Image (cartoon, coloured by chain):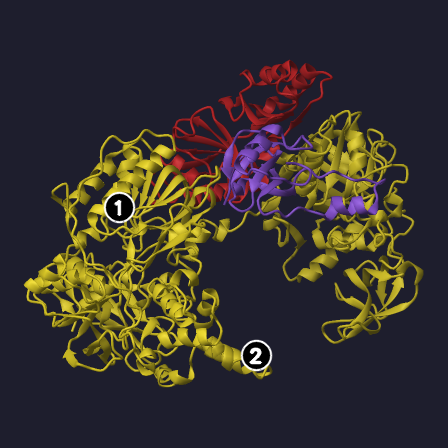
Chain colours: A purple, B red, C yellow
Amino acid sequence: MLILTCPCCGVTSEETEFHAGGEAHLTRFGPESSDAEFEGYLFMRENPKGVHFERWRHVYGCGKWFHAARCTTTLEIFGTYTAQTTEPPQEIRDIIARKRPGWSWRAFS
Amino acid sequence: MSRAVTALDGATSTDGIATITEVALQGMITLRGDLASAGIKKAAKTVASVDVPGAGQANCSDDRGICWMSPDELLVLCPYDEVDASLDKIRSTIGSDHALAVDVSDARAVFRVSGAGARDVLAKLVPVDLKPQAFAGGMFRRTRMAQVPVAFWLHEEDVFQIVCFRSHARYVFDLLKVAAQPGSAVDFF
Amino acid sequence: MSTRLATGGRLIDKGKAVTFTFNGSKMRGFAGDTLASALLANDQMLVGRSFKYHRPRGIVASGVEEPNALVNLGTEGTFEPNQRATTTELFDGLTAASQNHWPSLEFDVGAVNAKLSRFMPAGFYYKMFIHPRPLWKHVYEPFIRQAAGLGKAPKGRDDDTYEHFYAFCDVLVIGGGIAGLTAAKAAAASGANVVVLEQTAHWGGRSLVDGGTVDAKPVDKVVEQMVSELSDMPNVTMRTRTMGAGVYDHGYVLGYERLSDHAPHSTSGPRHRLWRIRAGHVITATGALERPLSFAGNDIPGVMLASAVRDYVSNYGVSVGDRTVVVTNNDDAYRTAIALKTAGLTVPVVLDARVTPIDSPLMSEAKAAGIKVLMGHGISKVLGGKRVTGVAVCSQAGEGAVLEEIACDAVAMSGGWSPVVHLWSHCGGKLLWDTDFAMFRPDVDKAPIGADGRAFVSPAGAANGHFGLSDIIGDAHAVGAQAATALGHDAPTSAAPEADSVDEAPMAAVWLMPQGAGKTLRAKAWLDYQNDVKVSDVQLAAQEGFESVEHAKRYTTLGMATDQGKLSNINGLAILSDALNQPIPQTGTTTFRPPYTPISMGAIAGEARAEVFQPIRRTPLHDWHDANGADWEPVGAWRRPYAYVRDGETVHDAVMRETKNVRENLGLLDASTLGKIIVKGSDAGRFLDMLYTNMMSTLKPGKCRYGLMCSENGFLIDDGVVARIDEDTWLCHTTTGGAESIHQHMEEWLQTEWWNWQVYVANVTEQYAQIAVVGPNARKALEALGGMDVSKEALGFMEWADGSLGGFDVRAYRISFSGELSYEIAVRASEGQAFWDALMAVGASLGVMPYGTETLHILRAEKGFIMIGDETDGTVIPQDLGLHWALSKKKTDYLGKRAHTRSHMADPERWALVGLETVDGSVLPDGAYAVADGENANGQRNVQGRVTSSYHSPNLGKGIAMGLVLHGPDRMGEIVEFPGTDGTVYKAKIVNPVFFDPEGEKQNV
C-alpha cells in the first residue's frame, strides 16, 4: 500500500486516504473534435512499465486533486504536484531525469 | 431551539479505556474562498474571535474556533444559536468577493474522546501517526476513520474532538465504543 | 516413548500443573508448555492424519514450520480448526481434537488411500476428475468436497473481538531473537524510534537453546539484559506474541498480535490485534528453519527435526524418545546428540552423510561424550508404522542396501538450515543461492524499494544467511546501525558485542538419502508431510512436463498446505532441479506471499463486525421510522423505509395502502437522503450549463427546473431538480446515491479542467431533513401548520420559497415526483424529527400516512417518470428515454454532447422507452427480456427489449411497467413476449409510459 504526500494540504498518508483517478494530463476534446481525437480523449491510455503520471484525489483529507509522478515497476514516487497544470513541472521532470535517465512519456521527456 | 437535537441526543460511553461523549449542538460554517485574502480572514475572525490557522492546523477554544479544511476552505465554529447572525456577519464582511459561506451545523456530529486511552482508541481507527510528538495540540487532521471520513483535533491533552457527518454519528459512536472496549489498552504511546 | 524428564525445561513452571483434553482424553501439562510439548510429555506421538493418504502423522517441529500437528481447538464460539500445536500455548481447560480421520485417529478408514497411493500419484485429481464431464456436478464435486479440507469449519458465531492498530516507527525489527535484539539495540541507541516484534512468548529465539557467550557472559543472561535495557528506552516498543505477518509496499507491515490465545479465560479485551505498521526501515531478523532429510519413512511419527528434539528437551524437559538416532548432513545436529546425552538419554548413533577429513569441534565433543558416529552413512528406511521402532542404516553413497538395523523410538534429522526469507521476499526482495550452505539467502543488493526509491528492508542474522553467534551478532549490529543512520539518525557509538564462535565443518547438500535411492524408497520419502508429496511425485511432475517451479508446485500441491512449504520447498526445488538436470538457482523459488503463517479472519476484519460491520447512514428520522414499522431498504449506505408495515399486513399490503393513500389523501416521505449541493459564483451558471444537458443559467431566482446530467461518455448519470437561490447561487438536488458522487464530479471538473472559473460548491445534503408532503391534502396540511403562504398563487408549481411553517424555518419547494399536489419542505436536520411530528399531528385529520420508497416508485411509474438506476444502468442515454427535450440545442458544449454524436449513440436501432401493460393485468417480471424471432450466434433467442421497472398499481388496478424496446415508440399497441424465469411467457402491449393523469391536472392545483 503506497504512501503519498498531498501537495495541497501537505499531509503524507497511506493510500486508503486517497483515490486514484487515472492518467494525468489528458486534453479534453469537445463537440468540434474529430472521432479520432474524441476516441483518444475518452479511451486511449498509457500503460507504461516505468515512469507514469497519474491523477489522485485526497478524498478522505482535503478533498483536492493532485498529480503524482510514479514508477510503475518499483512504485517509487518521484513527486506530487498541482492538478492545475497541463504538463509536469520542470522540477519533477528534473527529478525523474536524475533517477531514470532517458525517460519519456507521451510528449514529455 | 429546544426542538433541535443532536444525532444521538448526547450519547456517552464511560466503561472503556476512554470516555466517549457526543458534544452538544455546535455552530459550524463552511467558508470557502481565497484564504490569503484579507476579507476572508477578517470574516472568519469576526465570528470565531481567533486567528485563521495555517495549513493542517486548528485554532479552537470552547465553542469558537477556526479549522483549516483545505487550501480554500475553513470550518468556522461558533455557538449554535449564533449561526444565522454569524453567517450574516461573514457575508457582509466579504461583500462581493468570490466566496461561499454555508451553515453545516446540522450536517455534522461532534464527539469527544477523553482519558489516558484516548490516543489508543483513535489509533485503532485512523491511519495517522498519533505519537504525542507527531500529533500535538493545534494540529487538525481530516482522514478516514474505519470506513468513513472524519476530522479531529486535540481539544486539550488526552481529549480529542472528532467531527463526522451526522448520518454517520451512530456508526462513529459505536466504532469508538468498540475501540475503547475494556481490556484493550495498547500502551503504545 | 516420549515422556517428561525429571529435570530441565527452561520455559515451564513445574509448580503450575495445567489440565487439558486431547480427543476427549484428559491430560496434564505445565504452565509454559505448548500443546505440542504437553502432548509429547503425555506420549501422544500420533497427532493427526495427512491430507491425501491419511498417513499417521506426529509432531515434526517445535515452531511455526510444523506441518503435521494441526488440531481443532476450542468449542462452539471459540472453535478454530488447523491450529498448530507447536505454537499453541497451553492453558487450563484447553480442548483439542485431531483432524482428518474417521472414525478415529488410531483407526482411520481413509488410510486405505495410502494402500492405493500407487494409483494416486501427482496430479491424481486433475487426471481422475476430468472425464466424463457430466459426472462433474453430481459425482466428482461431492467426492472432492468430502475429501477437501483438514479441520472442520466453525459453525457458531465467533465469541471473540478483534481490532486493528495503526503504528508508525523509524525502524521495525521483525524477530526477537539475538539478531533482532542486537539490531534493535543498535538502531535505538542512535535515537531512532524502534518497534520490535517477536512471534513467540519469549525473547532470545534459538540462542537460549544453542547457548554460547557474548562479551564473556552466557547468552541467556545477555538476552535478559538486552530485553530489560530495550524495554526501558522510551523510543522502543517491544511486543511478544506478535508475528510480522507481511511486508508490503512503502514500508507497510502487518503485525499479528495474539493477546489472549494463551489465556482465553482470564483476559478481557480483543483476542487478536492486527498492527498496521508504517516503518521507515524494516529489519527482518526472522532466523532460519531447519530442513528435513528425504529418506524412506521420514514421515513416521517419531521422526523429527533435530533442532526440535533439542528444543523439547531444553525448553520443556520433554524427551521424544529414550533412544534417538541422529541423522544429519551438517554439524548442528551434533548439538542435539550432545543435549540428549547430557539429559541422560541414549543416542545409539549419529548417522552423518558427510565424509570429512578431520573432526570438527562438535564431532569431537560428541565422540568424547561417548556417542557413536558413522560418517558417510544415512537411513535406508525408518521402521515402524504409527511410531518409529528403528532405522535401517545404509551408505549415503549407495542405493540403500541395509547394513544394519538399529532399534530406536525417535529419529532426529537435519538437512541443513534455510534462512527465513519470506518477509524479505514479500515485497520484491531477491534471493541468491549460497552453495556453501545449500540455501537461498537475501541478495541485499536487490532489496524491496520504498517510496523514495531506496531499499527499505534489510535482513539480519540467520535470516541474512549468517550462522554462529559471532557472525549473527556482528551482522545484526551493523544492520541496525545502518537502518537508523539511513533515516538520518547519528551512528551509534557502541561497537558490536563480541561473541564466541564455534568452527563448524562444512555441510554437504543431501537432497535424497541414500543418494541412489530406488523407486520404492523414493515413493516413501516425503517432502510435504501435510499434502503428501513425495520425492517420486516431484520427479513425475518433471517427467510429465511441469518444469516451471510454479507449475510443479500446483501440479503436485507441494508447499500448498497451511504451512506453505516451510519445510518442504527447498528439498522439493532440489529434487525438481535434479530431475530437470539444472542448477537450483535456475529452477528458482515459488513466490513467498503474506501472511508468513495463517492469521485469523477476525484479525483481518478488525472492528468491522456486528453493529460496525459497515457504516449505515441514518437520516434524522431514522429512529421514528424504525419505531413505526419501517421495512428497511438499503439505498447506497443509507437505510430508507421501503414501506411502513402495520400489524397484520404484509409488506405488499402496506405498499398498496400507502400508494392509494397518497393519491387520495396525504402522504409524507422522508426525502432527506436526496443530494443537495450549493453551487455559487460568477461562473456558476456557465458551470451548470456544462454539467446539465439542459440550460440552467437561464433559470430565474425563485424557480426550479428538472435537469439531467451525463458523463463525458454520454451516459445518463444523475437527474434532479435545480433551484436558483439568487443571482450567483444555485441548489442542485441529486439522487440519493448521487449526493457524494455528483459533488465529487463537480469538484473534479472545477479542480482539474476549469480551475479558473469562479465557482465554489458545497455539499449540504445532511444539513437538512427534507420531507415530501404529497397528495390532495398537502396544501391543507401546510396551511394547518400555519405560516408562509403556500397557495397556488404564492408558490406555483416548480417554484420555491423560504419562510416559516409551524414556527420552523423552512425552505419549501413546490415540486412533484408523483403527479400529485406536492411540496418538499427542508428544515434543519436537528429539527427534522420535531417538524415531522408536527406534520403528523396536523395530518391526522387529513388522512396522513408516511410512505416508503416502493410507493415513491409506483407513483412515479404511474406517471412515467424515469428513475436513475432503474431506467438507467450506465449504458443508457437521454435519447433512449425520450428525453430529447432536455438536451439543449442552444448550448455549444456540455458533458456528453460530443459523445451523443458518436455513431452508436445516434443509432436509430437503440432500444427506446415505452410503457408496457400485460394483456391479463399481471405484473411483468422486472428485468425480463422481450424475445424476437431467431437465434444469435450462440444459439440464444434474439432479444428486442427489456423491462426496466415493473409494479402493481393499486390506483389503476393492474400491472404497469416501463421498458426499453427496439423501435418501441413506433410500435404502440403491439404485443411482445417476455419469457419469465418461472417458465411463463408474459405477453405485454406496448403503450405510452404515462399511465396516470397524462394531462398533469392533479399536480397543478
In the displayed structure, does residue C701 sit left or right of residue C489?
right
- Which amino acid type corresponds to the residue marked 1 in the rendered image? Ala
In this rendering, does residue C100 appear at all? yes
In space, the residues marked 1 and 2 are separated at their CA atoms by 54 Å
What's the chain of the residue with tag 2?
A: C
Residue A17 versus residue C421 in the image, above or below: above
- Quadrant location of the N terminus of chain C? bottom left
Q: Position of residue C286 (x, y in %)?
A: 31, 51
Q: Name the secondary structure under disc 1.
A: helix
- Which amino acid type corresponds to the residue marked 2 in the rendered image? Lys
Q: Please report contact status of discs 1 and 2: CB closer than 8 Å, yes or no.
A: no
Q: Nearer the viewer, residue B126 or C870?
A: B126
**Quarter assignment of residue B101:** top right
* Circle on res. C137: 2
Q: Position of residue C387 (x, y in %)?
A: 22, 77
In the displayed structure, does residue C473 sit left or right of residue B68?
left
Q: Nearer the viewer, residue C209 or C695?
A: C209
In this rendering, does residue C786 appear at all? no
Q: Position of residue C890 (x, y in %)?
A: 90, 37
The residue positioned 85% from the left and 64% from the top of the image is C917
* Circle on res. C837: none
Q: Residue furthest front?
A: C357
The residue positioned 64% from the left and 62% from the top of the image is C648
The answer to whether dots 1 and 2 both sit on one chain is yes
**Quarter assignment of residue C114:** bottom left
What's the chain of the residue with tag 1?
A: C
**Quarter assignment of residue C655:** bottom right
Circle 1 is placed at which residue position?
C179
Q: Residues within 10 Å of mark 1 (few under 14, many from 20)?
A: many
In the displayed structure, does residue A33 sit left or right of residue B63?
right
Q: Name the secondary structure under disc 2.
A: helix
